[in-house]
Image (cartoon, grey):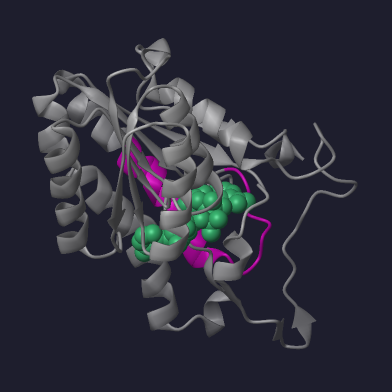
Amino acid sequence: RRLAGKAAFVTGAGSGIGRAAALLFAREGAKVALVDINRQRMQEVCSEISTLGAEYAPLPADIANPLEVEAAYRGCLDQFGRLDIVFANAGINGTISPLELLTPEEWKQTIDIDLTGTFYTLKYAIPALKDSGGGSVIITSSINGNRVFTNFGMGAYGTAKAGQVALMKMAALELARYKIRVNAVCPGAISTDIEASSNRKPEVDGITIPIVYPEGGHPLAGESGRPEQVAKLVLFLASDDSDHITGTEIYIDGAESLL
Ligand code: NAD
């Protein structure tokens, strides 16, 4: 088992990509701290993990609140006594709107959760990762804002997702001396509930804002990816199999971003 003896902290563990990673980490022998703002969905994933016989800790927190993130790490350390892996994954689409109509509050909500929340998740992990003699941090960015700019209306989201990659690179360089690796995954469209977190302004100047999906489906599979496929990449980055990889973003999009 590739994560035997390790302790992992997964944000957004109640749904989609975070849920798939939490379950895979548990199957690979890790103790898993599940962090989510949605307590009910987080508890449902905890029940799934308990059937695998793995150790877990439910830690409700809003990643945009630094006090709650810090408290969640304290809870993780109280229960597991160590920290080796951080999957900074929680995020929202936020408001999909042309910049002209995007309000300061809407901009702030997306940046606060997707970018600043990732910073808190990274920052408050550092002391515990140092104490463990190193570790692996994986951030869920996106093709949006990095390779794809055609999804009109995702100005705040794309800015946050590009910012996460810059943050990842800064952190990788700064933390290499502590044997802490930091990488990002950049998924294309993955079938999850994330659309439910979108606040879409449907029509502007009589034009409907499209989400642009590739014509004829995704090049590789003809359809969106699955959370379990992203989780396998995250497992690789979390495990010692990737022990010489840091400061890198890896695209997982079935070539969607190359169209
Ligand atoms: P999802 O909505 O299925 O899961 C996201 C989880 O994060 C939910 O359980 C939600 O409750 C939680 N969450 C939201 N805000 C939070 C907060 N402030 N604090 C704590 N938890 C919070 O979505 P998903 O698709 O699994 O998204 C996971 C990550 O993947 C996000 O960062 C998203 O931007 C990224 N991503 C998704 C896609 C896609 O197509 N699904 C593509 C590229 C990147």
In this rendering, does residue 145 appear at all? no
Answer whether residue 154 is magenta in the image: yes
Residue 90, compared with residue 107, is above or below; it is above
> Residue at (53%, 64%) from the top-left corner?
93
Residue located at (39% from left, 72% from top): 109
Please, is residue 257 above or below residue 176 in the view? below
Identity of the residue drawn at 45% across and 84% down: 103
Q: Position of residue 81 (x, y in %)?
A: 13, 32
Left or right of 23 on screen, residue 82: left
Query: Could you tell me which residue is drawn at 85 percent across and 39 percent down?
Result: 222
Foreground: 51 or 82? Answer: 51
Residue 63 sits in quarter:
bottom left
Does the magenta run of residues contain 165?
A: yes
Q: Quadrant of the N terminus?
A: top left
Dominant secondary structure (helix, strand or loop) of the stretch shown in magenta: helix
Q: Position of residue 34 (x, y in %)?
A: 35, 47
What span is colored magenta in the figure? Answer: 147-168
Whether residue 154 is situated above or below residue 247 in the rendered picture: below
Q: Is residue 81 above or below residue 113?
A: above
Q: Residue furthest right?
A: 216
Q: Quadrant of the C terminus?
A: top right
Indicate the quadrant where residue 79 lies.
top left
Q: Is residue 33 visible?
A: yes
Of residue 11 and residue 250, the one placed in the foreground of this image is 11
